[in-house]
Amino acid sequence: MIQTEPNMESVSPSSPIVSSSNKTLLLTLEEWNGSSPTKLSKTFTIKASSSSFSIQRSGARFTHVWRRFLQAFVPEGFPTSVTPDYVPFQIWDLLQGLSTYIRTMLSTQALLSAIGVGEKSATVIGATFQWFLRDLTGMLGGILFTFYQGSNLDSNAKMWRLVADLMNDLGMLMDLISPLFPSAFVFIVCLGSISRSFTGVASGATRAALTQHFALQDNAADISAKEGSQETVATMIGMALGMLVARITIGHPLAIWFSFLSLTLFHMYANYRAVRCLALNSLNPERSSILLQHFMETGQVLSPKQVSSLEHVLPIQFTSWSSKKANSLDTKVRLGTRISTFDEMEIKEHLLSVASYYTKAKYLLVEKKGIVNVIVHKDSSGTDVLKSFIHAIVLASNVHKGKSLHSDSQMWMENQYEVFFQKLKSLGWKTERLLSSPIIWRANWIHEPLAEKID
């Protein structure tokens, strides 16, 4: 920053800093430091004229060094470059990671003992073969998990993030108990390896989705890099503490199990708190259902933070007993139904009777036994799929209220959908598409009048 101030003292024509009015100017130069325009601090000031020169340093040198140190661990422009839930999530995530590294030392110690490290009777080829089987089953488990659930990780990032760490706990538990059952050692460690392979796939995939969520300034790569630095520090601390705990508890099975189980409970709690901190603004089936039900009742749309406290973070099998989950309408909608699953009677009874309501839509809704089946058109876009799901939720909410399901739901869509859609946008929800399992079955249909027979 440069400032010039007039000096009333007269100077000779040879003076280097003069104005057009033959007056000396005072030149002020300021140095500012910061990772973003909104986070700048003045560090250095120079004032110069033909007769004077002064330098002034602003701020403590320690402050500047500390700021440079933090740049290795937080994204550029922090905290304005990330979402508000970034800090609490990272704190709990680092704490759970710390407990993981400590427990890893205990489980690895037990695993090496079971393989025969330190035993004269153990052979190198035997230990190598057992370790090979352990790694091989883990690789195969990772491939199978990706095949069955890989496409579902984006839509349920919070749930799979938590499940991933629970599977990691199970894998380390298998390693710890392996020395207790020598005859079943290979089987147990292979189960543990498969469990951890699920963790690797789910954790990596959900971390990518969460990184995109945190990035407010298209800085996902920077956030990922800085998280790597944070993980490295947590790993080093965890390894040091783990070696200390392993050293203290060696030869004391009760102390080992007490330490392991205590750290596991803390790990599970920290993971739960971490995912509960997340306020994702993408629309998946459950969040869409929560938003729509609240809008239909009150006319208002919830914010991402409000919805985050209502959605479940455990698999549906563990939460089916909850009345909150039982009332969620997203479980009554099947997106991407195959038309070949309908027989002749169902086509005449369901499809033909409702087709007239969807002449301008890129989807068809068919209600059977309380379940709303969504048949998606082959040319439908992301917004069309989102609209079809919202329409299906509206229809599902009226299943037990009357017989004019399709006409009532169509009227609601014509009068309220655009209002609901605009309110979602105003609160920061991403309305470009619905995060759901891939729709692999689509359909095409043509509405034509039936030609009358002529005698």
Image: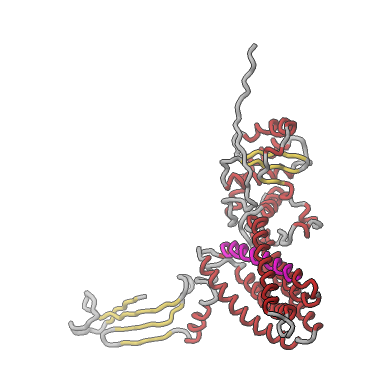
Residue 343: quarter of image = top right
- Up-down relation of residue 368 to residue 118 (above or below): above
Tell me if 21 is positioned left or right of 321 in this view: left
* Residue occupying the point 62% across, 50% down: 438
Locate the N terminus by quadrant. Answer: bottom left
* Residue occupying the point 70% across, 66% down: 194
Tell me if 138 is positioned left or right of 7 in this view: right
Q: Nearer the viewer, residue 121 or 201?
A: 121
* Residue occupying the point 76% across, 81% down: 259
Q: Is residue 204 magenta?
A: yes
Residue 202 visible to an observer of this rendering: no
Residue 361 lies, in percent from the top left, at 60, 38
Q: Is residue 133 magenta?
A: no
Q: Nearer the viewer, residue 167 or 351?
A: 167
Residue 180 lies, in percent from the top left, at 81, 77
Q: Bounds of the magenta span?
A: 188-212
* Residue occupying the point 58% across, 57% down: 428
Residue 322: quarter of image = bottom right
Locate the C terminus by quadrant. Answer: top right
